[in-house]
Amino acid sequence: MAVDVLLGLQWGDEGKGKIVDVLTKGYDIIARFQGGPNAGHTLEFDNIKHVLHTIPSGIFHKGSINLIGNGVVIDPIIFKKEIDKLVEFGVDINSTLYISRKAHLILPSHRVLDAASEAAKGKNKIGSTLKGIGPTYMDKTGRNGLRVGDIELSDFKDRYANLVGKHEQILSHYDFEYDLKSMEQEWMDAIEYMRTLNLIDSEHYINSAIKNKKTVLAEGAQGSLLDIDFGSYPFVTSSTTTCAGSCTGLGIAPNRIEKVFGIFKAYCTRVGSGPFPTELFDETGDELRAQGHEFGATTGRPRRCGWLDLPALQYAIDVNGVTNLIMMKSDVLSGFDTIKVCTGYMHNGTEIDYLPYNIEDGQVEPIYEELPGWKEDITEIENYEDIPQTLKNYVSYLQEKLGVPISIISVGPNRNQTITIEKISASV
Ligand code: GDP
Ligand code: IMO
Ligand code: MG
């Protein structure tokens, strides 16, 4: 009677998609609980790279059901394109993909509102992916939104027109040009297509599955430092990316959650605007970007790179109740003479070891410890015993500092480039 949760502990793009794919064979159901097409989850196997935006990352495993929960926001156009690509790879969507009737819909006018809002913010822009995420969640909490279940109602078109009317009123306050009409037909066609999919009352489905001892892995999107409450507000996304979001985004009770897998990169990245205390503006930052191919899976934007930030990681571990850590992209650190880790900050003239309220530029100055690096190429290594001693030391150092075991280390983008330190089994 349990659910395991997997989520990102940094600013997103930690490698969640890869690890969900690796873990899926142990689970009956993979369920996305928040976010939308702002996410880009990359999976690599059989020399092919797949990027998923709305669809859970267990979709390539025939034996598992993939559920899009009520906490997710769906852009029908992007969703249909994503499905079309999967069908080309022989994925049988009809038998493996379920969608919550309570998930909210992203309208073309939400995307316009997102763009208008960002343009009006000028240099203070969030750096949104411009997928309409913020405006859609605003309509959800504002009790104006359209949900997937609404497309089954006879007055859906009226509901749509009514909401678009509200958006047009808001847009009239912006100095922003747009052409909604050109986007609407494709959207309506995609809605028509969605009507043919498995739309379900997902909270009933998931709770009876849990009662029937099915194993469930909840897949997070974005990262804990982009959480609407606990992230670097206002430079965040508009959903609860932390563990609590899996309860509200799927309709499961907190006492059902057993393991919480926290994914982090062996260093740190961020895409979009907002504070990033350990960001590197020098050659080392460029080297991390080049070696880690740090360019966004959704927007292609270069990711900002820096060293691992332990106070920020500890904060995310605490907020989520992480039971197992998974360290990604360890291979990217190969070749550095030394590796820096931020262990605290200078803040208002004092040394602190926690993430304070204000981490904007100039408020916190990272304090680093320096550890020896390793030179070896580790991308072909399969067993923990065979990794360089200095990497083992890095792993032990982090485990000790953070007080949580590191169960997996990832040494490359491929499914197979995954080293298990401690075997993970699905909670039942
Ligand atoms: P997600 O949003 O958390 O699923 O992560 P993304 O897919 O946006 O970004 C992670 C990127 O790193 C993708 O391009 C992955 O293929 C790649 N990746 C994942 N794990 C590793 C790893 O261990 N080493 C390397 N070099 N790349 C990795
Ligand atoms: P995955 O699931 C990295 C960032 C954007 C922007 C901010 C708000 O692939 O890890 P939004 O479009 O949500 O209004 O953008 O959040 N952002 C992400 N960064 N990975 C993601 O998802 C992200 N989703 C949103 O860059 O700074
Ligand atoms: Mg991503």
Image (spheres, helix red, strand yellow):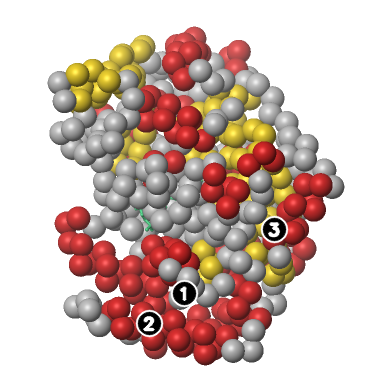
The residue most toward the right is 212
Q: Which residue is mark 3?
A: 203
Residue at 40% in and 46% down: 229
Q: Which residue is mark 1?
A: 144
Count neighbours of disc 3 (C-alpha within 10 A) and say few if under 14, some if 14 to 19, many if 20 or more: some
Residue 96: give x, y in percent of width and height: 74, 59
Image side of residue 122 versus residue 420, left or right: left
Secondary structure under badge 1? loop
Q: Which residue is mark 2?
A: 166
Secondary structure under badge 3? helix
Secondary structure under badge 2? helix
Do the CB atoms of the residues marked 1 and 2 lie less than 8 Å apart? yes
Tell me the kind of residue under disc 1.
Asn
Residue at 49% in and 56% down: 35
Image height of 335 relative to 172, above or below: above
Residue 145: give x, y in percent of width and height: 49, 73
Image side of residue 12 versus residue 233, left or right: right
Count neighbours of disc 1 (C-alpha within 10 A) and say few if under 14, some if 14 to 19, many if 20 or more: some
